[in-house]
Image: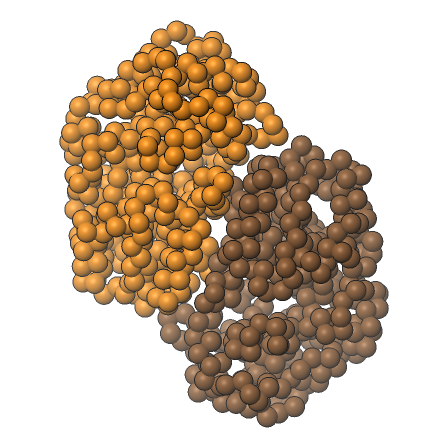
Chain colours: A orange, B brown
Amino acid sequence: MRVVDVQLGDRSYPIYIGEQLLEQAGRYLEQHGLSKQSPLLIVTDEQVAPLHLGKLEQSLQAAGFRFVTAVVGSGETSKSVAVFEEVMTRAIEGGLDRKSAVIALGGGVVGDLAGFVAGTYMRGIRFIQMPTTVLAHDSSVGGKVAINHRLAKNMIGVFHQPELVLYDLSTLQSLPAREVSAGLAEMVKHGLIWDAEFAYWCLENAERLKALDMEAMGYGLEKGCSIKAIVVSRDERENDLRAILNLGHTIGHAIEAVAGYGEIIHGEAISIGMVGSAMIGEALGAKPGLKDTTSQMLQALGLPTVLPAHLDTDRIMGAMMHDKKFQEGRMTFIVPSAIGVVAIDHNVDYDLVRQTVEQLKKEA
Amino acid sequence: MRVVDVQLGDRSYPIYIGEQLLEQAGRYLEQHGLSKQSPLLIVTDEQVAPLHLGKLEQSLQAAGFRFVTAVVGSGETSKSVAVFEEVMTRAIEGGLDRKSAVIALGGGVVGDLAGFVAGTYMRGIRFIQMPTTVLAHDSSVGGKVAINHRLAKNMIGVFHQPELVLYDLSTLQSLPAREVSAGLAEMVKHGLIWDAEFAYWCLENAERLKALDMEAMGYGLEKGCSIKAIVVSRDERENDLRAILNLGHTIGHAIEAVAGYGEIIHGEAISIGMVGSAMIGEALGAKPGLKDTTSQMLQALGLPTVLPAHLDTDRIMGAMMHDKKFQEGRMTFIVPSAIGVVAIDHNVDYDLVRQTVEQLKKEA
């Protein structure tokens, strides 16, 4: 069993990483002082529910907790205002009060949706995350939760830290290979922004990670969560440093928006975006080879590094203009200067970004 | 010009109370370091817009600020999820970024709606309040913002403090008498919970207040805001003390819900609720006369103190069960023991509350 402590003053919380944790969920909630009088709300999706909900419910029941459950459709469409309102209805009808907690059982979408419910129900109640994907290691640290507006992703949200994260590695076994790789994109990203040694470790252990070797996966998630925890604890509200976690995300979000959510999934879009960031890094003075090493790492983890040629460059640029990383008209990018070293550049030239997007369609 | 400083550490902010402040809004925003590159969003309603929006827009324009405006319908129905989403659309289309601010120009509904937009747009941007009602002095302190779920009022919200409040007394001149009185209910409430002298001052100056005498109104609003600021600064997130601000609100909210929002407006419902609280206080040991003095103060301010007989007691009790003041099944009430002195009682008997609601239909 591994534990990562996210240090955020009176909002600090632990992440437990280990096998068969869902079966012990009741005990963990008891230890953390959750109320047995106030009902819990479990939010999960239709893919996760048949696989893992039973174990969780059984464990909570055995420990004497009361709960109601909201099962939403799987995928990004559940981060809509309409689904948010439905889950709120469930919370109200279930009689949740100020001592209640919302549990997110699932991946990033469920975590974001459930977290925004927890952050706004009665102006904020307790929040517990139980990630079931590799990707969700990223969203389980830092308290950023949000839903989508039809015009822009993650536009409606708050900062709301969980009280506790139970990362049950056993749940990862049911993930399709494509989703495992997509999750590994965020894992290696934590190396690329902060820790070259960890980035190379991901490269060397790519096969073990893709095969869901529990020892390798446990270490990778612990390390990924730890790096993110350090960054977030130094800048909880994203005033400056925290922005480095967005490596690859400006281009990545635009790719997702233009491709239509689903054709290219989040981790894949971020992978292509990180290759683009490395290209921008080289154009701005990083040693040649940065882009090739970055691509090699991502490819080893089973990730795409080339942009599908049919995606229109102008539409991608247009989608970026809606992105939150633009302030006062200038383009802000997280730009790597070497593996493990990035800087926040607020003055990246629009034309350079455009050329990079074009280039991403050609190079492998 | 009067200034109330709301002390909340790094979230502290000033409330300026005076005449013709909207005409100087541009200068105030400039002094407070608002960005002229990032567009502002003004949220107001169709009643306030024709009266006051022009003055504000002119002042912002003259100072070189960019802005877009969202005019919503007036009244509680604009605190819906649907209207919230529309205002978000306006913010996105207007190109608001992280340095932008949302300005609430209007009463409590506009403040709540605009505040929730500011609190959740890109996970929280700056918020400025420009109240145009007496009632809004209450919501301009404390950072509680929320919208309604169709099943329950104020159920979806966050804590989001404004940066600045500009209270332009000149805007109050256009208020109907009924709304002035409704606002005075919250003003005298601040005396009833904290400061007997101020409660009696409200009684003695009732005629001047109802006639919108600027000197009396300025003092009353300053005092009301100051008392609330003291309470909120000691307990920003409503863990304990802050709950005393809910005097009269448990019964009041239930009355509003059952009467249908509109027949009895918020301040009126709170007035009846405060009489009920005084009755409960007497039943639990306060000196006889507490209820009569409370009623006398409220009547002097032009407020109702009797519950319309056609409102069904069982429905009122049912509506209370949905209220946020219930935790783990027990009934929590703010119970006065004298004018200016209240306590939080977590164990008020259900039957006593029911009898009180019945009694409220009979006594003047």
Q: Is residue A322 left or right of residue A45?
A: right
From the top left corner, tell me how far across and down residue A99 is, in percent. 39, 62
Residue A260 lies in quadrant:
top left
Q: In this view, does B22 lie to the left or right of A154?
A: right
Residue in the foreground of this view, choosing between B354 and A323: A323
From the top left corner, tell me how far across and down residue B339 is, in percent. 65, 79
From the top left corner, tell me how far across and down residue B6 is, in percent. 66, 54
Q: In the rendered view, would you say A99 is above or below B128? A: below
Q: For the point 76% across and 56% down, which residue is it?
A: B50
Residue in the foreground of this view, choosing between A85 and A24: A85
Q: Is residue A92 visible?
A: yes
Q: For the point 31% across and 57% down, which residue is it?
A: A70
From the top left corner, tell me how far across and down residue A22 is, in percent. 20, 50
Q: For the point 31% across and 49% down, which residue is it?
A: A73
Position of the N terminus of chain B, as image quadrant, is bottom right
Q: In the rendered view, would you say B343 is above or below B92? A: below
Q: For the point 28% across and 24% down, which residue is it?
A: A303
Position of the C terminus of chain B, as image quadrant, is bottom right
Residue A135 lies in quadrant:
top left
Q: Is residue B96 visible?
A: no
Q: In this view, does B180 lie to the left or right of A13?
A: right
Q: In the rendered view, would you say A180 is above or below B300? A: above
Q: In this view, does B241 lie to the left or right of B225?
A: left
Residue in the foreground of this view, choosing between A35 and A342: A342
